Image (cartoon, helix red, strand yellow):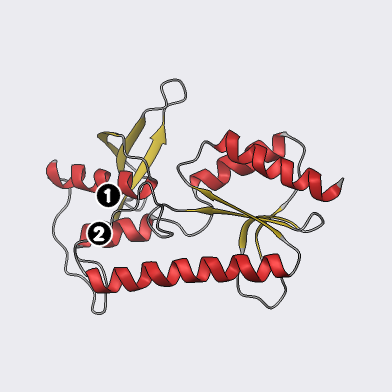
Amino acid sequence: MVHASVSLRVLPKTRRIRASLRWGDGRRSPERYLGEVEHDSRQANLAEGWRLAWVKGLLREQTLPEGSTASTPAVRASMKGNRGRDTKPEKVLRSLLFKEGLRYRVNAQPIQGLRRSADVLFPKARVAVFVDGCFWHVCPEHYRPSTKNKEFWTEKSTENQRRDAETNRILEEAGWTVIRAWEHEAPEKVMRRVISAVRRATA
């Protein structure tokens, strides 16, 4: 059995997104083009990539491990592929900030002992930046509730929202500026918000 993953690549000039299936055979990592995807979130594009792989007959059904909350093997693979850190939107934002001369910490805790990590952190300016995924953090524009395991996902979504609100409150009460951006937002726009907050704090 070979384990595969779906990768997404944005074409520089057209901004079109191409999905490919990648797998390893122990010596190299072959890749098979699946098609273009055009959803608003990375989660949705990954799911579409897996759907295309099934349609093309490149995958076969696999038994879900005991205790898995995913409804199908394809959903489980998509969930595993959706990183909790170092996502593409985060990397793009960090690159833009670096080019503007800003220096920061990555995936760091604003408050020692508090188990909450910001995606981009400016300790001196006390600015904490979070780049939230549309599915996991319930984006008002793109979030679509799951129709399977509905009770589980509703509870998880509610808990994520509660945790985000609590994190904002704790940091703001401690004197931090909290900036939250959705993964679908234009990185240049987010960059300007961050730069403005950092400069205000260090003026």
Question: At numbered mark 2, what does the secondary structure look like: helix, strand or loop?
Answer: helix
Question: At numbered mark 1, what does the secondary structure look like: helix, strand or loop?
Answer: helix
Q: Nearer the viewer, residue 120 or 174?
A: 174
Taking the spot 47% from the left edge, 46% from the top edge, the residue there is 183
Determine which of the numbered discs, if any, sits on residue 84 in the image.
Answer: none
Q: Nearer the viewer, residue 15 or 74?
A: 15
Whether residue 172 sits left or right of residue 155 in the image: it is right
Residue 151, image x, y percentages = 25, 73
Taking the spot 57% from the left edge, 71% from the top edge, the residue there is 166
For residue 163, above or below residue 146: below
Packing grade of label 2 (10 A; few <14, some 14-19, many >=20) is some
Q: Dividing the image into 4 quarters, which one contains the C terminus?
A: top right
Residue 69, image x, y percentages = 27, 72
Amino acid beneath label 1? Ala
Residue annotated with mark 1:
47
Residue annotated with mark 2:
75
Looking at marks 2 and 1 on the same chain, the residue that comes earlier in the sequence is marked by 1
Residue 68, image x, y percentages = 26, 74
Residue 143 in view, yes or no: yes
Give the alpha-carbon distance from disc 2 to disc 1, as whole Å: 7 Å
Q: Nearer the viewer, residue 50 or 89?
A: 89
For residue 121, above or below residue 69: above
Q: Quadrant of residue 57?
A: top left
Whether residue 75 sits left or right of residue 130 in the image: it is left
Q: Are marks 2 and 1 in contact (CB under 8 Å)?
A: yes
For residue 194, above or below residue 77: above
Amino acid beneath label 2? Val
Residue 110 in view, yes or no: no
Taking the spot 40% from the left edge, 35% from the top edge, the residue there is 9
Packing grade of label 1 (10 A; few <14, some 14-19, many >=20) is many
Whether residue 161 sits left or right of residue 131 in the image: it is left
Q: Nearer the viewer, residue 127 or 107?
A: 127
